[in-house]
Image (tube, helix red, strand yellow):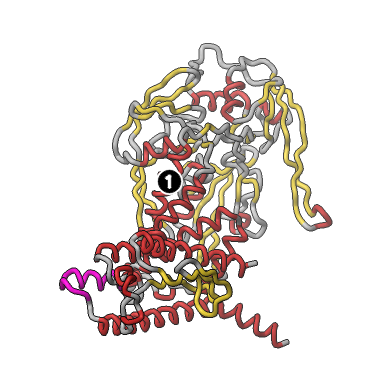
Amino acid sequence: MDLLYFVLFVSILIFIHEFGHFAFAKLFGVKVLTFSIGFGPKILKVRGRETEYCVALLPFGGFVKMLEEGKAREEILPEDRHRTFEAQALWKRVVIVLAGPAMNLVFPMALYTSVYLEDREFLPPTVGAVFPGKPADGKLFPGDTITSIDGEAVASFPDVQKAFAKRAGQQMRVVVERDGKAVDVQITPADEVEVVEPSELELYEHVGRIGIAPTYAAPVIGIARTDSPAFRAGLRTFDRITAVNGRKVETFVDLTRLLSQNRGDNVVLTYVRPVSVPKALGGLCDIAVLDTGIASLAPRPRVEGAATHDGDPSFRARDVFERTGIESAEMYAAFVPEGSSEWRAGLRAGDRITHLDGVAQQMWKVDRRGGHALDDTTMVGQLLREPNRVHELVWTRDGERMSGTFQVRKERWDDELGQHYERYVFRTTHWMPRAPSKLVPNPHPVFYAVKRGALETKNAITFIVVGFVRILQGRVSIAAVGGPITLYDVAGDAGAKGTAYFVWAMAVTSVNLGLINLLPIPVLDGGHLLLFLIEWVRRKPVSLRVRELSSLVGMSVLVILMLVAFKNDVTRKWDTIVLQVIDLTR
C-alpha cells in the first residue's frame, strides 16, 4: 500500500509541474513533441495530434519535450520554424520555464484551501479558562462571552485570536457579556515569542495573546477537607456533577452559578463517579467505570450582613468553596505512577497540589485548544522551564499539609528516520475534562479557506527557504536532506493517516519541489532562467556550446546532491535495512 501512496504522491506532483510547462508552451504556440510522467521504458503512451503523452516506468520525474533548434536544423520543417522554443520572445520563454515551479507553488494553495473548506464551524468567542498571570487574569472570567474588540464585532474564537495576535503591546477595549450585562475592560495583549518547529531553523513568531482558552471545564469537583458539607454529603474528589435539583449542568461555571444562588437550603446533586477496575479483561488493562449517585448537600448559610458580590465570578467560586467545600478538580492529582520521583516524594492520587517551589499554583497546564504553546505560568510550564533542578512540591491530603522534593523525568528516543529526540515529562496527571462546546457557523467559508490556503502556502515557502539558507550557513546539517526513501516514508505515513494528512504532506512537498527547481543550477528551471538573464544582459542568446557545458555541470551537481540524499536515507534506515536483509537470508 505504501508503494501505491508513493506512486500517487509523486505522480501528481510531477504532473502538476510538467503541466505548467506544457500549458504555457501550447498557449504560446510552441510545438510539444512529448509529455511524459516518469523516465525510462514507457508503460503507457497515447498519440495526440502532434504530442505523445506517456507514462514511464520510473516515477522520479518527468519532462515536456518541445521542438527546439539544435545541430540538426534540417529536421525542422520550414512551417514549424516559428514554433520552436528558441523562436519565441524572451519573455515567453521565461514564462514557459517559470510555469512549472509556479504551478508547484499555486497547487498547494488549492490543496490547503480544500482542507480549510471543511472548517464550517468554529468554537464560540467565549472565555472558558483564564491563565494565571496573563493579561486577562482578573479582567475576564470563565463564562464571559466576548462580543467586540476595539469596536469590531467578533463571531468566533479564531476572530478573537486574530484580533489580539496583531496588537501585541497595545491596549485594547474588550466588551464582554457577563450575566446578561455588557462589561467593558481594557486589556493589553502580551508579546509572546514562539519558536517554529524544528527549532534548528531558528524561526520565531511574535504573537499577541491575553491568556484565555475557549473551552469550559466540566463540572468535575475537588473536595479538599473531610469536615466540609460536600464530604459529609458523600461527595468525593473527581465526582462529575450532572444536575443540581434536577437542573442539568454541563460546565463548572454553571455549577458554581447555581450553588452560589443557594441561601442555605438543601441541594440535591446528581453525579457520576469514576470507579477504578484494576487488571480488567483478565489483567490486560486498568479501566474505570462511571457509577451514578445522588447526594443531599446542606451548604452553610451566608453570614448575616456579610458583603456579597454575586455578579463577580471570582467571588462566586470562593463563596461556593467556603459554604460547601466544593472547588474545581484542576489541581488534584489523578494518577501518580508508582516508582516515579513524585511517588517517592510522597504524592498520591487525590492529593491537591498547592505550591511548587514556593509559588502558589492555580492551573495544571495549558489547554492547547486555546491556541497556546507551553506556558510557564502553569505548574507543568514552570516544571519544564527548569527541568534539571530539584523541585519542592507542597500538597494537601484531607486538609493536612504535606511536601516533598522530586526531579522531572528525561526521556530519549530515536524515530524511524533516525532523528534523535529528548524531552522532559511530568508523569503525574490530573483529570480535568472539558465540557462540549456549542460551535458557531463560519460566516464566510470560501473566503476563509482561500485566505488560510494562501497563508499556509506562504508559511511553507518561508519554512523551506529558511531551511535552504540554514544549510548553506552550516547551521543545519546536510544530513537533514532527504531523498526518495524519505519521500516514500512520508507518502506512506501520510496515506495511512488519511486524506487530510496526505493533502498536507503533498502541499509541503509541492512547495519544496517548486523551490528546488528555481535553484540556479543548469538543467533545472532556475538554471534556464539564469541563462535567459545572461541573454537579456548580452542582448543575444547563449551559444549552444555554453548551454551543453552548463547542462553537463548541472547534471553533475544534481547527481552529487542525489547521492548525498540517498546516503542520508540509507543512514537513517540502516538498522531497518539490516534487519530486513537478515530476515531474507534466514
534 magenta-colored: yes
Q: Nearer the viewer, residue 108 or 300?
A: 108
Left or right: 200 in relation to 343: left
The residue furthest left is 538
Q: From this view, report whether residue 300 is shown above or below residue 360.
A: above
The residue under label 1 is 452
Residue occupying image coordinates x 71% and y 31% = 235
Residue occupying image coordinates x 61% and y 57% = 497
Q: Nearer the viewer, residue 233 or 448?
A: 448
Left or right: 137 in relation to 277: left
Boundaries of the magenta span: 528-541
Q: From this view, report whether residue 18 is shown above or below residue 324.
A: below
Q: Position of residue 536 (x, y in %)?
A: 19, 69
Q: Residues within 10 Å of mark 1 (few under 14, many from 20)?
A: some
The residue furthest right is 282
Residue occupying image coordinates x 61% and y 70% = 3
Q: From this view, report whether residue 189 is shown above or below residue 335.
A: above
Left or right: 390 in relation to 250: left
